[in-house]
Image (cartoon, helix red, strand yellow):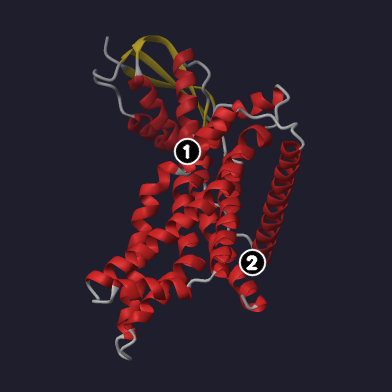
Amino acid sequence: MPAKLSFNYPQTGTLRVKLSGDWQIYASIPSENEVVAELASHQDTAQIIFDTSEVGSWDSGLVSFLFRLVRDCEHKNIQVSHQGLPQGAEKLLTLALKVHTRAMPEKSARNPFLERVADKALELYASTLSVLNFLGEITVAFGRFISGKAYFRRDDFIGIVQKCGANALWLVSLISILVGIILAFIGAIQLQLFGAQIFIADIVGIAMVRVMGAVMAAIIMAGRTGASFAAELGLMQVNEEIDAFKTLGISPVEFLVMPRVLALVIMMPLLTLYADFMGIAGGFLISASVLGLNPVEYWHHTQSAVRLSNLWIGLIHGFVFGIIIAVCGCLRGLKCERSAEGIGVATTSAVVSAITSIVVATAILTFICQVLGV
């Protein structure tokens, strides 16, 4: 039986739309424009009700018709009652309207400037307080670890160490070698003007050991491991596994965060040493093969230029960067919203905040070293 529409007015200002027949998507379905035309002929209509007692079979065609009609009536400030619709169609229509409202939020008026400044200040205060609380929880967890009361699985810790260390060697090797080559070429451009190309060894050695090795390894680990931490913990937050740990009396910071922080604190100085060696090797290879420097003399210059203090400064950088990357990744993961979009936002925020913090920490450490004369 074909789908049909009919109209009547049981009372003033109320339009009753009677639907009959089979409302299926492959059949010929009346357009909502028929209802709109009826509304145009009665300007005083404020409400629409439905009578579906004679509707036969229906599918998404009926829901689509109702959805388009409701959207048209919203612009005309006409109320559409869902009573009288088939139960399944009413639920599907409600769900479709919720999704549409969420996907296209209404534009709100722009707040005054001082109000926006105050909101940003309060957000900054809340985020700072959240970071401090999280650092306090990590400190308490490490205190329990030192006293032997912390609970986490050793097998998980070993797996995290492997992912943070051995699995990252190839990428660290590639980037460090290329950075060493770049530093060598940059030094050669200026030093060849004075016939002092041999001091390329000093530039590459000091730059890699003191700062660049740690910074490049940290940026790689922020994009690789920090994002991984945020995604793992964010997915656990979405699946309510974090709540399950709390219900069982297990601290998520102690069981999940502390092994990750400990793993990066251990592996980042080691990766820094490895990045230093690979960067110096890259500068050595390009200087000996392309720039025509004596390999033995280059090696002696590197040994005399790189002091033990430079090595310790680089290791301190790596230690600090390990803490920063782990804290940023774990914090964003635990604060993740419970949705797929929330996981993406948490992952992005972890990488951005980690890299920004690394740059800021590098500037602070460099300033401190300059003040101390080391």
State the separation of the CA atoms marked 1 and 2. 50 Å
Residue 3, x across and y down, in percent: 30, 16
**In the rendered view of the protein, which quadrant contains the C terminus?**
bottom right
Mark seen at residue 210: none
Q: Residues within 10 Å of mark 2 (few under 14, many from 20)?
A: few
Label disc, if present, on residue 162 of the rendered structure: 1
Q: Residue at x 47, y 50 (%)?
A: 221
Q: Give the answer, above or below, for where 235 lies relative to 204.
A: above
- The secondary structure type at the circle numbered 1 is helix
Q: Quadrant of residue 89?
A: top left
Crowding at mark 1 (Cα within 10 Å: few <14, some 14-19, many 20+): some
Residue, disc 2: 113
Q: Tell me which label, 1 or 2, sits earlier in the chain.
A: 2
- SS label for mark 2: helix
Q: Is residue 265 above or below residue 4?
A: below
**Viewer-nearest residue: 138 or 98:** 138
Residue type indicated by callout 2: Phe
Instruction: Tell me the residue at 62%/73% (across/down).
Output: 369
Question: Considering only vertical position in the picture, is 54 above or below 125?
Answer: above
Tell me where residue 156 sits by quadrant: top right
The location of residue 355, given as percent across then percent down, is 51, 58
Which quadrant would residue 70 be assigned to in this image? top left
